[in-house]
């Protein structure tokens, strides 16, 4: 029998002692939970099932969802994509409008007033426009709070103040969305017919509404630019209403992932529509002479109307001429 | 000049208030939707209280 030399025995003994000391750290006594092992199972389950659900006795079955990886995508969109893209789109548009104003000035300033006024929008049209506008301003500000509030307002008013404001902003967003939907429907009823494409639109678009060509292109009641605004507001409004209803009634029509997708679509369209409405506000106030009067008191100068909407003025005159035809004498009317 | 603006804004506020009063009855608040009058916890050995959970013992301790 060969005996190992003493010089080799000591390192082996030392290693055995170290191994013995390390055993309690790595081995788990029976009955204790190994959290790492459970996490492994959870990860496998998540990969195979896309989301983890438990068993619950609550009436709302959606509360059983424990993990839903799309939530991380949602957080990415909410925390990075939305604030960045929203800020770039809105600030770029404001810069473009400011540059346009500096270069072109106020459109239509050369048109001399005739002193005669004609009605452009009746009271119902104007009241509905301003009702929808009021709702849109509330919805836009409270919607932007959702994207930028944490970054812009919380530093000014503190977490508690911001929480209170956001709670009320959410109520306002939910409640003002309904008159907004009503306003969009009434707009469709009032203005759809005049916003259908006609033969003047292409010429109007080619000359950029008179910016690029010589003279002002002909237009009926609404020119092609106004029609684009109308359809953007109507289609964007319907889009916002549909996705908003999905969010307003959680889990009624879609699950948690569906609500996240609805949130992307709602917020994305909201930013685009805010950009569109900013352009509309610009052209309706400082951008064009006489444009505000149309929606203010409903009356515009005849020269302004002939300059921007010659076909509409002509049609209106011919209708008035028809209605001013001499009526049958009273003695015949009763026959 | 301002009549249509004021009327439109007033209608918007009135409709929003009306919705604010009626909408809560059509929707269930989260504290009610995500709760139950009672709860059953299965596999009591695996929950936070553990095997030794007894109502009478808990009452004595607290």
Image: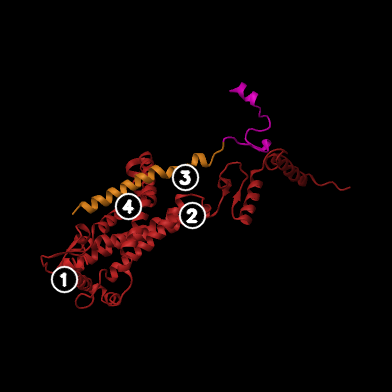
Q: Nearer the viewer, residue A191 or B31?
A: A191
Chain B: what color? orange
Neighbour tally class for label 4: few under 14, some 14-19, many 20 plus, Cα within 10 Å: many
Q: Does the magenta run of residues contain A109?
A: no
Say what secondary structure mark 4 lies in: helix
Q: How far separated are the C-alphas under marks 1 and 3?
A: 60 Å
Identify the magenta region: B37-62
What is the residue that sits farthest to the left in this orientation? Answer: A115
Could you tell me residue A175's position as x and y percent? 37, 47
Q: Evaluate whether label 4 is on the same chain as label 2.
A: yes
- Mark 1 — residue? A326
Nearer to us in this view, A23 or A276: A276
Spot occupied by residue A68 in the image (x, y as percentages of width and height):
55, 52
Chain letter of the residue carrying label 1: A
- Could you give the CA–CA distance between mark 2 and mark 1, rounded to whole angstroms? 65 Å
CB of mark 1 within 8 Å of CB of mark 3? no
Q: Which label was assigned to residue A135?
A: 4
Specify whether A65 is left or right of A231.
right
Residue sitting at the far front: A335
Supply the letter of whichever chain is red: A
Task: For the residues labelled 2 and 3, say whether their Cβ atoms are less than 8 Å apart.
Answer: no
| Disc 3 element | loop
Chain letter of mark 4 equals: A
Chain letter behind tag 3: B
């Amino acid at each position: 029998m060969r005996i190992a030399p003493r010089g080799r025995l000591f390192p082996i003994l030392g290693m055995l002692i170290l191994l013995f000391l390390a055993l309690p750290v790595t081995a788990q006594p029976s009955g204790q939970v190994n959290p790492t092992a459970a996490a492994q199972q959870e990860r496998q389950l998540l990969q195979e099932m896309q989301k983890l659900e438990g068993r619950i006795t609550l009436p709302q079955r959606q509360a059983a969802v424990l993990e839903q990886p799309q939530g991380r995508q949602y957080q990415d969109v909410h925390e990075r994509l939305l604030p960045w893209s929203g800020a770039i789109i809105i600030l770029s548009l404001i810069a473009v409008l400011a540059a346009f104003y500096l270069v072109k000035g106020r459109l239509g300033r050369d048109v001399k007033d005739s002193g005669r006024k004609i009605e452009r929008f009746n009271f119902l049209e104007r009241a509905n426009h301003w009702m929808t506008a009021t709702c849109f301003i509330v919805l836009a500000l409270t919607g932007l709070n959702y994207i930028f509030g944490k970054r812009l307002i919380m530093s000014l008013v503190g977490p508690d103040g911001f929480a209170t404001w956001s709670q009320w902003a959410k109520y306002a967003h939910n409640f003002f969305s309904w008159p907004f939907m009503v306003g969009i429907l009434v707009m469709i009823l009032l203005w759809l017919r005049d916003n259908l494409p006609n033969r003047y639109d292409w010429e109007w678009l080619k000359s950029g509404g008179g910016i690029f060509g010589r003279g002002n292109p002909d237009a009926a009641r609404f020119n092609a630019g106004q029609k684009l605004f109308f359809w953007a507001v109507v289609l964007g409004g319907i889009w916002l209403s549909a996705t908003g209803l999905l969010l307003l009634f959680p889990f009624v029509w879609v699950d948690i992932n569906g609500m996240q997708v609805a949130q992307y679509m709602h917020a994305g369209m909201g930013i685009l529509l805010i950009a569109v409405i900013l352009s509309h506000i610009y052209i309706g106030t400082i951008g064009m002479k006489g444009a505000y009067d149309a929606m203010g008191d409903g009356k515009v100068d005849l020269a302004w109307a002939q300059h921007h909407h010659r076909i509409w003025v002509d049609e209106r005159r011919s209708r008035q001429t028809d209605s001013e035809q001499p009526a049958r004498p009273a003695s015949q009317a009763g026959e | 000049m301002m009549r249509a603006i004021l009327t439109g804004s007033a209608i918007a506020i009135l409709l929003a208030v009306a919705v604010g009063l009626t909408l809560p009855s059509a929707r269930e608040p989260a504290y009610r939707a995500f709760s139950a009058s009672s709860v059953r916890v299965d596999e009591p050995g695996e929950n936070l209280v553990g095997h030794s959970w007894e109502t009478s013992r808990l009452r004595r301790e607290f």
